[in-house]
Amino acid sequence: MHSTAKMYFKYVLKHPCKSIAVLFKKYPSDIPIRKVLRLLPKNAVIVEAGAGFGVHTQIFASTFPLGKIIATEPVPEVFAIAKRKIQDFKNVELLQFALAENGLKNLEILFDATHPHESNSGLEPTKDFFEVYRGVKFPNKIQVDALTLDQLSAKFEAIDLLWLDLQGMEYRILSNGGHQTLKRCHYVHLEVSIKPLYFNEDDSMQIINFMSAQGFKIIYQALGIAYGNILWKNESFNK
C-alpha cells in the first residue's frame, strides 16, 4: 500500500467520525444549519449553550445583525478562541459559564486540553465515547461557574431559538431549571445520544417524552450512529 494511502487508512481508523464528516461535507448527525436559520425572524433572539469555538455563534451573529445572541462556553481555552472569533459582533454576549441544575452554582468539567473541542462534560465518559472520539483521554478537570437555563435566559421575554450542546446533560438542564425558558421559546435544537457516551446520561426517549409533554413537536431530526440532533417547534406559538 502506498505510504499516503496508509496514512489515510490509519486516520480513518483513528478518527471514524471525522472521516465520515469529510465524506459528507458535514457530520451525518447534523441538521443543515440553513433549515434552522430560515425559520427565524430578522431580529432573532438566540440562546446558545455549549458554544465551543464559536462556529455557530459566528453564523448566528452574521446572519441576524439585528438580533441578539447570548452564548456560554465554560472551558477557558475554548472560551478564549470563541471570544476572538466573535469580538467584532456587537449583537453577541459570550459568557464563561456552564449550565447546571437548580441549586448548583459550580460544576466540575472533564476535558482534554490537547483536544479541547472534541468534547467536554460534567459526566464521566463511557467506553463508547472513547470509541467515537479516538485519542481523547479526558485527563483534565476544572471547576467552573454555573447558571441554570432560566437564569441565563431571564432577560428575554421571548426566545426564537434555544441551541443546546450539553454532552448528555440536556434533559436535566431543561427539566430542573429550564421550564420557564421553554415556555418562551419558539424552537429548540438539541443533541441526543444513540449510544451511551456518558455514564448516567439522559436516555434519548426520556428527552423526547419530556419535550413532547412541554408542547414541542419534532420538525427535523438527523440521527447518526452514536448521536444525533433534533429540532423542535413549540406548538403553543403560531409563526
Image (cartoon, rainbow, N blue to C red):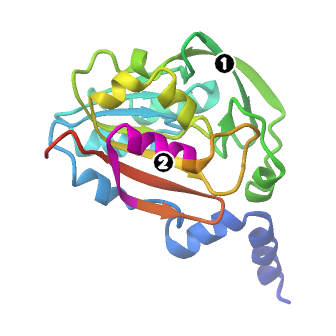
For badge 2, the amino acid type reads Ile
The one nearer the camera, 72 or 180, is 180
The part of the chain drawn in magenta is 206-220
Residue 210 sits inside the magenta stretch: yes
Residue beneath label 2, please? 208
The one nearer the camera, 183 or 4, is 183
Residue 150 visible somewhere in the drawing: yes
Q: Is 77 placed above or below 25 here? A: above
Element marked by disc 2: helix
- Of the image marks 2 and 1, the number of the one nearer the N terminus: 1
Q: Is 141 placed above or below 134 here? A: above
In the displayed structure image, the side of residue 123 where residue 180 appears, left or right: left
Q: Residues within 10 Å of mark 1 (few under 14, many from 20)?
A: many
For badge 1, the amino acid type reads Leu
Distance CA(mark 2)–CA(mark 1): 25 Å
Return the x and y of residue 116 as percentages of the image width and height: 68, 39
- The residue drawn where x is 63% and y is 13% is 106
The one nearer the camera, 6 or 34, is 34
Q: Nearer the viewer, mark 2 or mark 1?
A: 2
Quarter location, residue 149 = top left
Q: Is 196 placed above or below 57 here? A: below
Quarter location, residue 105 = top right
Q: Residue furthest bottom?
A: 1
Quarter location, residue 180 = top left
Return the x and y of residue 48 as percentages of the image width and height: 41, 34
Q: Is 132 placed above or below 200 here? A: below
Residue beneath label 1, please? 107
Residue 27 sits inside the magenta stretch: no
Element marked by disc 1: strand
Q: Residues within 10 Å of mark 2 (few under 14, many from 20)?
A: some
